[in-house]
Amino acid sequence: MELLGRQTRVDALTPTDLEKLRAALAKDRGPVALAMDIRVTRMVLKYAYDAGLIDRPVRVAMLKQPSRRVLREYRQRNGQRMLEADEIRALLVVAKQPMKAMVLLGVNGGLGNTDIACLPKSAFNPNGWLNYPRPKTAVDRRIPLWPETVKALQEAIAVRPEPDNPADGDLVFLTRSGRRWVEHSRGEKRTWKDAIGLEFGKLLRLPRCPACGALQTRQHVEKCSACEWGQTIDRGWGKLHRPGINFYVLRHVCETIGGENGDQVATDYVMGHVRNDMASLYRERISDDRLRRVTEHVRQWLFGADDDAEAGNDDV
């Protein structure tokens, strides 16, 4: 607004104006965020013309997307958007409810921030299944839940506060104040509040012992002889936080490890992905056994073999 002027008419925007806008956006955004902002801006301008809000289309050629090469180089510099099994286990040790349940849902079934914030109790079957179309796309999704995930969900529901808005009464997760964890406001000034991302970010920034890999909090100290936690002591510890790592990365984990099972069709169904091909059009169902093989593959990657998983669950 400040760059183009609040009183500037949309249909009066010139290619030079849009070139300046792109340059301003690029100053404080990486290529991925820049690509998203350009995509959204172009969509808004197209909608304005299609809806008859402006009399002529805005020429958007100067709002160029970052090239694929730039995006690839950016990804190479910042590394994979992944958390490894030992890192996720470390998060689960220190995560309190309901964040523990949220993390497990992210890895178990690829649920993202908004998926979790909108998750209704009615989608959760205590026998171990989640029947939950994605709020973003309405694509059907049926997810076999691990015993660890079922237990964490039950614990989270048991301590859930009363809703501030009665319309949110069926939601699995609510903040301490009874609000949704992800909120969108479409008033005069559109806002977006993501409390899931904020709380998960706090976990990512906890000091991590370089010897045993444990995350350090006042409640979890002295995991090994090298990691007596002290707020004022600098031991050169690392953190899980790094560029591109946030709660949504758990969806990357589920897709990456689940796909290694070799059944991409079943992995897509768990993730809520849809492909625009004839096979997807003709396919009427996917067996529960195929879905279980996907999520069990991820579970064994995270916790180890069944016996080890049961032992490790005490820490989770």
Image (tube, helix red, strand yellow):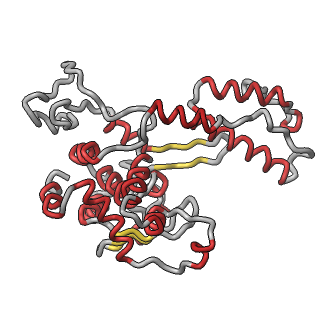
Q: Residue furthest right?
A: 55
Q: Residue at x 61, y 75 (%)?
A: 281
- Which quadrant is home to the N terminus? top right
Indicate left or right for 112 with 203 as reference.
right
> Could you say which is closer to the camera, residue 181 or residue 69?
69
**Location of residue 206 in the rendering, given as x and y in whole percent from the top left corner:** 28, 33
Q: Residue at x 64, y 48 (%)?
A: 186
**Location of residue 101 in the rendering, given as x and y in whole percent from the top left corner:** 31, 56
| Quarter location, residue 270 | bottom left
On screen, residue 6 above or below 159: above
**Location of residue 226 in the rendering, given as x and y in whole percent from the top left corner:** 11, 28
Q: Residue at x 56, y 65 (%)?
A: 274
Indicate left or right for 292 with 311 as reference.
right
> Could you say which is closer to the camera, residue 76 or residue 148?
76
Indicate left or right for 312 with 84 as reference.
left
Q: Residue furthest left?
A: 225
Viewer can see residue 123: no
**Location of residue 122 in the rendering, given as x and y in whole percent from the top left corner:** 41, 72
On screen, residue 215 above or below 95: above
Viewer can see residue 55: yes
On screen, residue 193 above or below 303: above
Q: Residue at x 34, y 64 (%)?
A: 295
Count of marks placed on residues: 0
On screen, residue 6 above or below 262: above
